[in-house]
Amino acid sequence: MSFDDLGLSPEVLRAIAEVGYREPTPIQAQAIPIVQMGRDVLGCAQTGTGKTASFTLPMIDILASGRARARMPRSLILEPTRELAAQVAENFDLYGKYHKLSQALLIGGESFADQEKKLDRGVDVLIATPGRLIDLFERGKILMSDVKILVIDEADRMLDMGFIPDVERIVSLLPKIRQTLFFSATMPPEIKRLADAFLMNPKEISVAPPASPAATVTQGLVVVQDEDKREALRRLLRAEPVKNALIFCNRKKDVDILYRSLTKHGFNAGQLHGDMSQPKRTETLEKFKNDEITLLVCSDVAARGIDIQGLSHVFNFDVPIHAEDYIHRIGRTGRAGREGRAFTIASPYDGRFVEAIEKLIGKPIPRIEIEGFDAVGFEPDAEGGRRRGRRPARGTGRGESERRGGRGGRGRGERSRRERAPEDENVIAAAAPAAAEPAVVEERPVAAEPTERPARAERADREERAGRNRRPRHSAGEERRSKPEPIRHDGSHMDASRSERRAEEEDDAPVLAFGDHMPAFLRHPVKRPASRSESDEERDVA
DNA sequence: AAAAAAC
C-alpha cells in the first residue's frame, strides 16, 4: 500500500513525499477514501495512529476547489486543547504546502485582532477550541452557514473536559447538510449518543482496540514512599537511555515543583500546564520539540494527542487517577511503530488506581526496582482512604528526620530483591538497563554498590546544598542549567533526610528580603494565588 | 482529585 493508491492530488502527494512518508497508516488507508467519497466517518482510533493526516489530507483536496467568503469558513475542526489545535494547523501547513488554502487558528489566550482579521479575509479551514469559537461567534465574527466539513477530534476528551454542551451548541449552528468526521479514542455510551446525533450513516473505522497501549511501549512501575518520588525519578532518568521525556504530574502545582526540582538537580527541563500564559506554553512546547529542552514536566494538558517525534520516554510522576489517562499519557511514546519506554512512580496509596489501570490494559504493569530503594508495597485500600498529606505538617522537620533514623534506600537494596516473585523475566533492572544508546541526561550508571554510605560524601552533600543556598539567585536560571550537572553520580544524595529535602524544596520558593540568614522557622514558601500563570516571572524576580 | 477551556 502506498499513498499513490489513495487518489490524493499530485500536490498533496508531493507534500507527503517531502515530509518523508511513504506508506499510509491503517487509519489513513481506511479513512482517506471514505472522506473523499464525502461520507461521514466514525473513527475509533488512539492518537499516534496517524489520525490527523487521515482527515487533513483528503480535506485539503476537497477544499482545493472553491473559495471561502468573508467570515464564512468552509470547514471546521474542533480540538479539546490549544496545543492540539495548533498541531492540526501545522498539519495543514505541512500537507497543504502546494495549495492555497487559507486557515485560521482560533484558540484562547491569544489576541482577537489577528484571528478576526483572518476570518474577515475568509478561511477554508477553521481550527478551534470551543470556547474561543463561541466567543467569536457571539461577537458576530463568524457565520457558520457555509461549513461543509466538520471534524470533531478527541471526542472522549471533550466529554471529560465538559465541552460537550459547547460542542452541541456549535454543531447546532452548522448546516444540517454537511460531512462530519468524528474521532474518539474510546466509545463510552455518551460519546456513542453524540456520534449518533452528529453523523449520518457513518462508516465506522476502528484501527486499534481502544484501551490497549501500543505494543511497542515497554512499561514499568515502581512503588516508593511519597517523599522518595523525586529521588526515584532522578535515578530512573539517569539509568534510562532518555533522549527526551514527558513527565506527568496530576496537579499543576506539582508540575511546577517538580520542574524546579529537576532544574535544580541539573536536568534540562521545562514545564507545561494550563495556568501558564499561552505564549509561554507555545514557546516551551516548541523548545521541547526542537530538543532544546530534554524533559518536559507537564499536566494532562499534554496527555493526549500531542505528537512529539521520537519521544523516547514517558514518566508518570503521579499515577493518573483516571485509568484511561494512563493510556493516553504513555501513548505519547512508542508512536508510529517506534520503541518507547514508560515508567510509573506510584506511592503506597495508589494501589487502587494502579489496579484500575491494570484492569483496563488487561495485564499487570511489570514491577521494576530502582537500585537502592526498598521494595515498597501498596497499602490496603482502607488506609488509602485517608491518604497522608503530601506535605506533612511543618515543624522544624527535625523530629521527623530523627524518627526516620537512617532511612535511606541505600544499604537495603539487596534485601529488597527477594520481593521479586511473579514475573521475573519482566523485571526491568532500571538501574542497569540493557546496553542501549547511552542516556543523554546521565552517562554513568547509578551506583551499584549499596553497602556503605561514606561520611565524606554525606558531608560534601551537605556542603554542596549549603553552597547552593549562598549562591545568588540568577534571573536566568534556566539557561544557567542547560547542561546536566555531572555531580553525585554515586547516589550519595540518597540519604538526605526528609527535612533536608523539604528545606531544599522550600528553597525553590521566592524568599524576599531575608538574605542568607533568615531563621529556619521563617523559611516558608510564599503563599501564592491559585493562578500561577506568571510563575516564571515571579521566580525571576525572587 | 484534577485537568482543560472564553473574557
Image (cartoon, coloured by chain):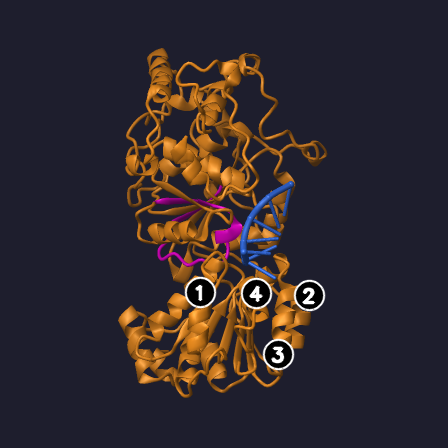
Chain colours: A orange, B blue
The answer to which of A154 and A217 lies nearer the viewer is A154
Residue drawn at point x = 55 percent, y = 30 percent:
A527
Residue drawn at point x = 46 percent, y = 42 percent:
A534
Q: Which residue is mark 1?
A: A113
Which residue type carries mark 4? Asp
Q: Earlier in the sequence, mark 1 or mark 2?
A: 1
Look at the numbered discs 2 and 4 and tell me whether their residues touch, using CB distance below 8 Å. Answer: no
Which residue type carries mark 3? Leu
Q: Is residue A449 left or right of residue A204?
A: left
The answer to which of A99 and A391 lies nearer the viewer is A99
> Do circles 3 and 2 both sit on a common chain?
yes
Cα distance in 3D space between marks 3 and 4: 25 Å
Q: Is residue A114 above or below residue A392?
A: below
Q: Which residue is mark 3?
A: A199
Give the residues in magenta.
Answer: A294-316
Q: Which residue is mark 2?
A: A190
The mark closer to the camera, 1 or 2, is: 1
Q: Which residue is mark 4?
A: A135
Cα distance in 3D space between marks 3 and 2: 14 Å
The mark closer to the camera, 4 or 1, is: 1
Q: Is residue A531 magenta?
A: no
Residue drawn at point x = 37 percent, y = 25 percent:
A491
Percent position of residue A235, x then y: 40, 33
Q: Secondary structure at mark 1?
A: helix
Cα distance in 3D space between marks 2 and 4: 25 Å
Q: What chain does mark 4 sit on?
A: A
The mark closer to the camera, 2 or 4, is: 4
Crowd band around label 3 with a 10 angstrom C-alpha radius: few (<14), some (14–19), many (20+)? some
